[in-house]
Image (tube, helix red, strand yellow):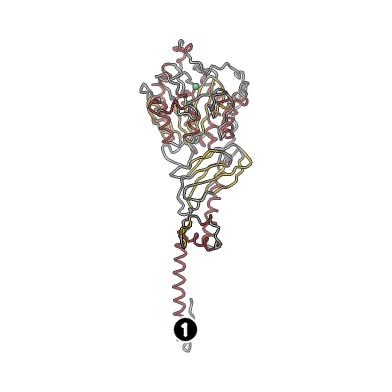
Amino acid sequence: MILMKMNLLLSLLLLASTLYSSLAKGAFQSLLPSEDFSDRSNVSRARRLLEDSESQARTSVDLTRGYMSNSDLERNIKEFGERCSNISRIYSIGKSVNGVPLWVIEISDKPGEQETEPAFKYIGNVHGDEPVGRELLIILANWLCDNYLKDPLATLIVENVHLHLLPSMNPDGYTLRKRGNANNIDLNRDFPDQFYFANDDEESRQPETRAIMNWLRDIRFTASATLHGGALVANYPWDGTHDKRTFYYGCPDDEAFRFMASIYSHSHYNMSLSKEFIDGITNGAAWYPLYGGMQDWNYIHAGCFELTLEISDNKWPKASELPMLWKYNKMSMLNLVASLVKTGVHGRIYSSGDGRALPGFITVSGINYTVKARKTFGDYHRLLGPRDRYEVVATMPGYKSKNTSIWLDEGAMTLDFVLDPEVSVKLKGGILENVHDCNCDSKSKLEFVQFLWGSHLEVFFVFIVILGFLCLLFQRRKKVKISTSKQSTGAKRTVVV
Ligand SMILES: [Zn+2]
């Protein structure tokens, strides 16, 4: 009975926390863009995605006018760190070939602290000659700082997400106005690939690539996006195909990725109106296969759902167009980050034994992908598109797995798991590994043994205490009975037992 009550109490607490989270998240504003754009004359423009901008480099003096140099960028980042120190942390993840620090701005109400919140990263300027992203990320950081506690979306992001911004992954390429880095290597072809093994040699990898890979070993990002130029589309995995042909090649989370990409394109001024890409989104391999890209590596090796965003038809537009490009991409950039708390399934995994957090695994039936819960808090963040039914399974070595069916609309859901440890019980003549897996006849007896030794040690302790108390009570009653019988002939006494 005590066990049942404790379980009931625990369930009620979990239910209350779930309801609270759902209500809080339900109160968040809609994912749809709040700005209405009236002029959409810029819908279709020529794409110059893969060409190196050497022709543009000839007029580089004009091009760089109004853009930040690398030292301007560093100064801006540091000034931001001082001005918005309450919600930010500035750090470097390494250096470029020519020794330029790769500065990152982390934005959160508790920057640098580990929380049960998802982390998102934006990376700009992967290609040296695509500088719009690095400019927009600085504007984004300042907008969040200026609007925190004033604008609900800014507040939601600062308080519920750890947002990391790397404005320039390729500062050397930017200075050289080239696509590749100082060694003329395309950094978006330099990652280990599932089909193309030439990049598997760690020693030959570029310092910028290594910096990103180490960064992702350090921080568990739930999702991210890189900002490119030369087209207008939200691109999602896979980027490559096993036979190098061009065709739609979806990853296990194709549905979730299409949902994510659509959030970006539909929040954008005109991306979803694209004549070239239905809905303004595309599968990478269906567009053109590439190998050694960052987004596939993120999904396979870092548990991070990454998009590749082409945010301006013109790779290097005049600086005077930057305010307009910010206006076009602003809601997309904000809504994509906010989607980490407004969509998907989130929660924690606990042990029923001692209530500690478990770094378990979350899988969804029918999707061949595993999301890991983090060690410290046992929290997990599983992005999923809206669907009528998902069966979510939590596992952890040494514990019995649990599964549950959920219905997911466009909102998020909080789902905590309390896992029972597996039991090894020594019986006559051998060891019984798992009581529940046994088809023995004396099931009730085994369940009682499991009750004693298994999941609720603290309850077992309480049971022993109660037993001791009852023994004492019995002995005392016995004594009272004896003394009462002795005094039965004398004066009447009231005995309270
Ligand atoms: Zn690019």
Residue at the left extreme of this rendering? 99
* Residue 79 seen: no
- The picture quadrant where one finds residue 187 is top left
Q: What secondary structure is marked by label 1?
A: helix
Q: Amino acid at mark 1?
A: Thr
Q: Residues within 10 Å of mark 1 (few under 14, many from 20)?
A: some
- Residue that badge 1 annotates: 484
Pick the quarter of the image with the N terminus. bottom right
- The picture quadrant where one finds residue 45 is top right
Q: Is residue 63 above or below residue 6?
A: above
Q: Is residue 151 above or below residue 459?
A: above
153 or 184: nearer the eye? 184
Residue at the bottom extreme of this rendering? 489
Taking the image as shown, residue 202 lies to the left or right of residue 49, namely left
Q: Is residue 183 above or below residue 104?
A: above
| Number of numbered callouts drawn | 1
424 or 308: nearer the eye? 424
* Residue 402 seen: yes
Query: Residue at 59% of width from left, 30% of height from top?
Result: 262
Residue 435, percent across and down?
A: 51, 57
Taking the image as shown, residue 94 lies to the left or right of residue 130, namely left
Residue 395, percent across and down?
A: 51, 46
467 or 107: nearer the eye? 467
Residue 301, percent across and down?
A: 47, 34
Q: Under 8 Å from ligand 1: the CB of mark 1?
A: no
